[in-house]
Amino acid sequence: MPITSFVEVQPDSHFPIQNLPFGVFKPQPESEPRPAVAIGEFVVDLSVLADAGLFGGPYLRNTDCFHQPNLNKFLGLGRPAWKEARATLQKLLSADESTLRDNASLKQKALLPSSKVQLLLPIAIGDYTDFFASQHHARNCGVMFRGPENPINLNWFHIPIAYHGRASSIVVSGTDVIRPRGQASQSPKSPPYFGPSNKLDFELEMAAVVGPGNELGKPIDISEAADHIFGLVLMNDWSARDIQAWEYVPLGPFLGKSFSTTISPWIVTLDALEPFISHPAEQIPPPFPYLTEKEPKHYDISLQVSIVPSGEQHESVVTRSNFKHLYWTITQQLAHHTVNGCNLRPGDLLGTGTISGPEADSLGCLLELTWNGQKPLSLDGNISRTFLLDGDEVIFTGCCKGDGYIIGFGKCSGKILPSP
Amino acid sequence: MPITSFVEVQPDSHFPIQNLPFGVFKPQPESEPRPAVAIGEFVVDLSVLADAGLFGGPYLRNTDCFHQPNLNKFLGLGRPAWKEARATLQKLLSADESTLRDNASLKQKALLPSSKVQLLLPIAIGDYTDFFASQHHARNCGVMFRGPENPINLNWFHIPIAYHGRASSIVVSGTDVIRPRGQASQSPKSPPYFGPSNKLDFELEMAAVVGPGNELGKPIDISEAADHIFGLVLMNDWSARDIQAWEYVPLGPFLGKSFSTTISPWIVTLDALEPFISHPAEQIPPPFPYLTEKEPKHYDISLQVSIVPSGEQHESVVTRSNFKHLYWTITQQLAHHTVNGCNLRPGDLLGTGTISGPEADSLGCLLELTWNGQKPLSLDGNISRTFLLDGDEVIFTGCCKGDGYIIGFGKCSGKILPSP
């Protein structure tokens, strides 16, 4: 019998007491942002609980981390503090604990209907890194752009390949995405043209939220990497494929990505995901010792992408994938990132790269689903798409099915607005 | 007759009253960081001048921008405030102005010997972008890695090519650089090995400091780009060529760069550089309208790189280049960066990429100077180098020669420490 909360939670809710994802919200447009967890249809204002002296454990007693406009200070405290917060909140919200349940005025102040508040970016992101950790995605892109003989470079099997992304343009779910303008070309050897992107795409990703991080020059050992990952979010790494194709040689993606990246407002902790660990297949060739884990871990998180086409109300599911389809684990990604001494800071974001699965209907972007626009994708209602049109809304969801409950990520969505 | 200050400034000083570069310092190890300008052998504490009510102009009268641990708030105020600060400080420090000159106690509080204070990173860098704007550098790298037939990709002549860099590992001049460890390989098709980098290099760059920036989705027009650049710093984009060569296909440089990037502590304003404008040659092919400037501008800044080899006292000059050797202007770089809607924020850093000149002794990195290690470089005292050894110190300097004065950048240096 799973634990239950005095807060009513529907069976299909993403936010039962087993989850308690962390975010940041404003109760009123003019309020200061403050940290929260989600439960059912409510957000729990952690600044109110802190003011009431309810975080009495050794790590949280004397900190103002829940009186901050983002979670960075909390992330900097590390796993003992994260575990203490989770345990404290699970106890406070449980059905058989009276402290909050029977205090009507405190409950009214601390528990606010999610529909009435504004969710914000939960973290101040110092640096955002995007990996390329799905072999299916790497292979499909390789076949498309370099041919079927040798689709994946040798380095890919030794390195969790990644690039630095743009932190300033990361936005929270629900923020509109303006179609970027830029240069593109029919081929790398043809002269370019300029205009709004004609190949606007989504990328189904998840991202790890970092804390506490390391000092410059002091790599994080793979055995300690998990202690530097607070949790995961859904991420849509919007991509303008035409801009990207023209610009990316030799220094990688730049303006084809930096116009917007959307993340879900709720960070699901690794602690909440613990029951959904999935062990990946053996990596061949075996990785270097600095990437070798005693017990490599993925998580069994079902992911889904829907499109609500411009002018329509109805959403069509266009792909179903799973976090466990990745080749490189998030701990390998993190250990690799620091092996050269690079420092990570609380609130840094490590994207997984597009999470494509092995099947045709589990591909994580339109580039793959339509084979670079050559095979239009049929949506419900006799509508088709190669790439996204103005007015299209893209919705990601993700969840783990537990025994009598769901651990979910809510949604990560954005709608395309025309170029100015 | 150039204006002079009551503060004694040696004729070869980089910091006469015509310069007044902005930085951030701590008077004592336990003090709060605060903004400053440099003059001669002194730093001027702007928080002291602000407390004395000496910033009385309309833009600075009611701001606490000089009571901040970095210059970001000041950068966010924009060019009118920057010009007001410069005019106010030039007046206060001039030989014929008594306010500060004749106030012994204020002077003692505000003017501190540079040798006694600690200079810090002047800005909190939200995002760091590195361009690839020198045609000589692009050609040399292309010949080396892709052969002499077609050394520069077609896109290079249409786009100021760039990639997102790592912001967290940017350090101020004088910070030691720990040799990174990582994977490398004899060729892209050979299996990799792991260890300390054997091809540690410097890259002679400058970087533009951004303010105030733009909202997401609202590109900055090329005609307004200069109003978003506060000034320039020297930058050493340290590179591990072996790590970079193995990792960079297809997503660009990552761990080969992210272990450290060093900038000079003083930001020289575009206003101070105004007398040293240099007009670049016509760009062929002509750029798109969004990159077309009525009056393209470079600056005539002489740049020099020296190495003090491990165990030696004496520095050997290894290259002499000039900022004006760049192909793409910094305003073109900035306009390109935002054309897709990407937002820039105060304190963002835009590196130029390695500034190589046309001559063999004006190349901006050891990769070019030694042709990827094939031709060792002779230093004074019968010493030679292909790449940097542990204990080597690399020193960049840069300056403009005015009529009776020098506008200089001070130095940007770092010493290599062994891998842990």
Image: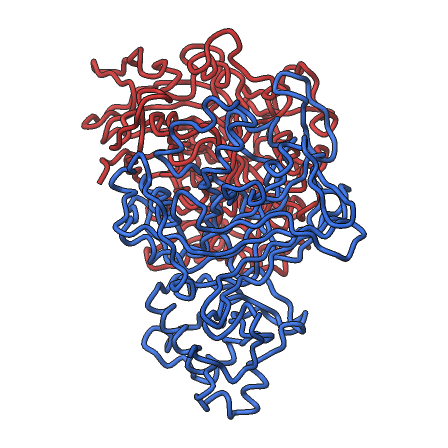
Chain colours: A red, B blue
Q: Is residue A96 above or below residue B17?
A: above
Q: Is residue B171 left or right of residue A369?
A: right
Q: Residue at x 40, y 34 (%)?
A: A257
Quadrant location of the C terminus of chain A in the rendered image: top left
Q: Is residue A101 visible?
A: yes
The percent coordinates of residue A336 (x first, y second) are 64, 32
Q: Quadrant of residue A333?
A: top right
Quadrant location of the N terminus of chain A in the rendered image: top right
The one nearer the camera, A6 or B97, is: B97
The one nearer the camera, B190 or B68, is: B190
Q: Is residue B257 above or below residue B210?
A: above
Residue farthest toward the top in the current orientation of the protein: A149
Q: Is residue A104 visible?
A: no
The percent coordinates of residue B111 (x first, y second) are 57, 80
Q: Residue at x 40, y 16 (%)?
A: A368
Q: Residue at x 75, y 47 (%)?
A: B417
Q: Is residue B112 left or right of residue A319?
A: right
Q: Is residue B211 above or below residue A334?
A: below
Residue farthest toward the left in the current orientation of the protein: A311
Q: Is residue A145 left or right of residue B288?
A: right
The one nearer the camera, B368 or A47, is: B368
The percent coordinates of residue A159 (x first, y second) are 62, 25
Q: Quadrant of residue B360?
A: top right
Q: How many labels, in total?
A: 0
Q: Residue at x 18, y 28 (%)?
A: A311
